[in-house]
């Protein structure tokens, strides 16, 4: 007989139970900062520029920043980085707010705009001028690029860098007063024109732009550059950890320089992580804008896109996107994720939640010749894997509709659906044997005929005989005609995303519209965003834009088959 567990073994077991899950590198940094007293709380933010709709990559940043704030019992700010009025619109502001709220990131009363701090930013620029750390430049944009040098050659000093503090203050004030045209003068930080980091070679921090701003109107005609404004916004709001994507890694020295020179008592810490890249999708705002303007898609929320609004319209759920982000993980290395992983996540989320309904996308009539006059009601379970979803009653009668490809007059081997002489199961109904079909003058099948076994009600034969094929159906007289939309990737996956000239390799079959689809009666009342599994056809969602009361339009979210294998 084995002896009882020793005290040492018990201790080891208890320690194993207490062992925490592995921490990503950002959590490790935050843990260290809290332990060393660098900060006593965690304060994060999500700072989009309102110049377009958010996409799936932004979801990673939203959920990361919000999740960290919740995890550490801290604060989360929703802030619009609206410092560039040339590209920003109120439409984008509202769409971003809607997307973030839908994802579940609750900013409560912590909604901010960078433009609210334009006064503080102006005073910060004046402070740098007084410290001899900023000057007004007369160089054009092309001349500034030329003076900046290259990766192998240092830059040249700007002639304006030798101006006196008093002159720089006067010129900057005149820029603010609107005395100069767009591009005529800029304010540059005075740092190091020989720095190996080109971002530190006297970057422009203010420019003249006579533009109406969506938030401040015509109050300002000078606007701060992002690299100057962003660290100021973070410092003003008390952000402890400014979490951004890897392309800002080379900008971090400038971020630190700004908060250091402006002498903020609790400077935020910038941390970079890898972006989320999906294979064969379009995320670039420039390309999406072109697709919208040319009418190739019907808006920023076209279900073929991966903007958050498009994913929501197609039928993706916040839970599925969170699962996707969790599976992708947080790292410092850029990598691409197969779109099939995103599809896997929505299947996983919906398969036990949504009822399994019958819809015939490409219908052909089926007539049961020996079925009596009248109809009966069949009780059909809503989801065999989740009994809590209950059941529904569906009418069944002599005339039905089935999928056109569920019948073949001359089938190949191993075709187990309907053909003359073959017996199949009508799902949750009866065994039927095909007796033949009717064709039109062009040879198209217009009607299929069969007989049924009245003793096989429920889809099982009392004599124990088996059938290999089961097909779904809808009742002919009660079926509701709807439009269904089948989507493929908008990019031709075999050719890659871009042509040699930089244009997009568009898939001409990215959208198939089927206007004669038939669904069982209960689906007539589907509400926008309501989703279902259509038996054998995939998961579908009632379109939020084009559905009407009693006449829903269904978008296929995803097919039922998956090529994705979850990594171990």
Image (cartoon, rainbow, N blue to C red):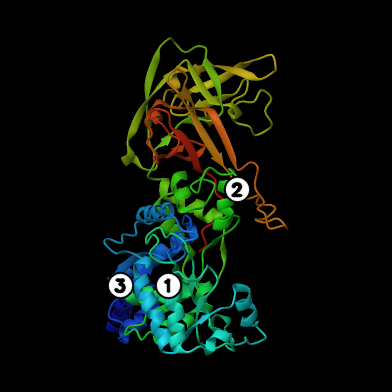
User: Which of labels 3 and 2 is toward the front?
Assistant: 2
Query: Which quadrant is home to the N terminus?
Result: bottom left
Residue sitting at x 36%, y 86% = 263
Q: Return the x and y of residue 304 as percentages of the image width and height.
A: 54, 46
Q: Return the x and y of residue 182 as percentages of the image width and height.
A: 53, 67
In three-dimensional space, the C-alpha distance between marks 1 and 2, rounded to whole angstroms, equals 46 Å
- If you read the primary sequence from the N terminus, does the residue marked by circle 1 or circle 2 appear first? 1
Residue assigned mark 3 = 72
Residue 390 falls left or right of residue 149: left
In contact (CB < 8 Å): disc 3 and disc 1:
no
Image: 412 above or below 367: below
- If you read the primary sequence from the N terminus, does the residue marked by circle 3 or circle 2 appear first? 3
In three-dimensional space, the C-alpha distance between marks 3 and 1, rounded to whole angstroms, equals 42 Å
Residue sitting at x 58%, y 82% = 198
Residue assigned mark 1 = 176
For residue 490, which numbered disc appears in the image? 2
């Amino acid at each position: 007989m084995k002896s009882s567990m020793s005290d040492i073994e018990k201790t080891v077991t208890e320690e194993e139970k207490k062992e925490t899950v592995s921490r990503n590198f950002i959590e490790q940094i935050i843990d260290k900062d809290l332990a060393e007293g660098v900060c006593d709380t965690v304060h994060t933010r999500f700072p989009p520029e309102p110049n377009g709709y958010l996409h799936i990559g932004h979801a990673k940043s939203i959920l990361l920043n919000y999740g960290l704030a919740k995890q550490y019992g801290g604060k989360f700010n929703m802030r619009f980085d609206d410092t560039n009025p040339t590209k920003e619109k109120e439409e984008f502001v509202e769409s971003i707010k809607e997307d973030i709220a839908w994802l579940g990131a609750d900013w409560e009363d912590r909604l901010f705009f960078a433009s609210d701090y334009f006064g503080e930013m102006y005073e910060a620029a004046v402070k740098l001028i007084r410290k001899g750390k900023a000057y007004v430049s007369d160089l054009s944009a092309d001349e500034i690029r030329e003076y900046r040098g290259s990766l192998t050659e240092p830059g040249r000093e700007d002639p304006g860098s030798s101006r006196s503090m008093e002159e720089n203050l006067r010129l900057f004030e005149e820029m603010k007063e609107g005395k100069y045209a767009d591009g005529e003068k800029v304010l540059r930080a005075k740092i190091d024109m020989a720095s190996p980091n080109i971002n530190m070679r006297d970057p422009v921090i203010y420019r003249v732009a006579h533009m109406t701003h969506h938030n401040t109107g015509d109050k300002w005609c000078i606007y701060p550059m992002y690299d100057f404004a962003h660290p100021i916004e973070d410092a003003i709001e008390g952000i402890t950890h400014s979490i951004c994507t890897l392309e800002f890694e080379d900008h971090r020295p400038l971020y630190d320089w700004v908060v250091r020179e402006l002498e903020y008592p609790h400077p935020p810490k910038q941390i970079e992580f890898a972006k989320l890249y999906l294979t064969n999708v379009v995320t670039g705002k420039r390309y999406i804008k072109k697709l919208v303007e040319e009418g190739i898609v019907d808006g920023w929320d076209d279900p073929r896109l991966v903007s958050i609004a498009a994913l929501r319209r197609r039928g993706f759920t916040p839970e599925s996107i969170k699962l996707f982000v969790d599976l992708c993980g947080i790292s410092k290395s850029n990598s691409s994720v197969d779109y099939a992983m995103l599809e896997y996540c929505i299947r996983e989320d919906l398969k036990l939640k949504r009822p399994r309904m019958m819809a015939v996308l490409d219908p052909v009539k089926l007539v049961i010749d020996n079925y009596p006059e009248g109809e009966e009601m069949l009780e059909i379970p809503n989801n065999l894997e989740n009994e809590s979803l209950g059941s529904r009653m569906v009418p069944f009668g002599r005339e039905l509709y089935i999928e056109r490809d569920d019948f073949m007059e001359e089938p190949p081997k191993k075709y187990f659906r309907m053909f003359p002489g073959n017996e199949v199961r009508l799902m949750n109904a009866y065994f039927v044997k095909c007796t033949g079909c009717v064709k039109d003058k062009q040879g198209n099948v217009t009607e299929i005929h069969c007989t049924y076994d009245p003793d096989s009600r429920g889809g099982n034969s009392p004599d124990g005989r088996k059938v290999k094929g089961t097909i779904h159906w809808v009742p002919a007289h009660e079926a509701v005609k709807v439009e269904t939309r089948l989507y493929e990737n908008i990019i031709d996956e075999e050719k890659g995303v871009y042509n040699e000239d930089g244009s997009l390799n568009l898939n001409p079959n990215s959208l198939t519209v089927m206007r004669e689809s038939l669904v069982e009666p209960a689906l007539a009342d589907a509400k926008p965003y309501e989703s279902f599994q259509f038996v054998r056809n995939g998961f579908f969602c009632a379109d939020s834009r084009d559905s009407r009361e009693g006449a829903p339009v269904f978008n296929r979210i995803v097919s039922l088959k998956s090529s994705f294998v979850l990594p171990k």
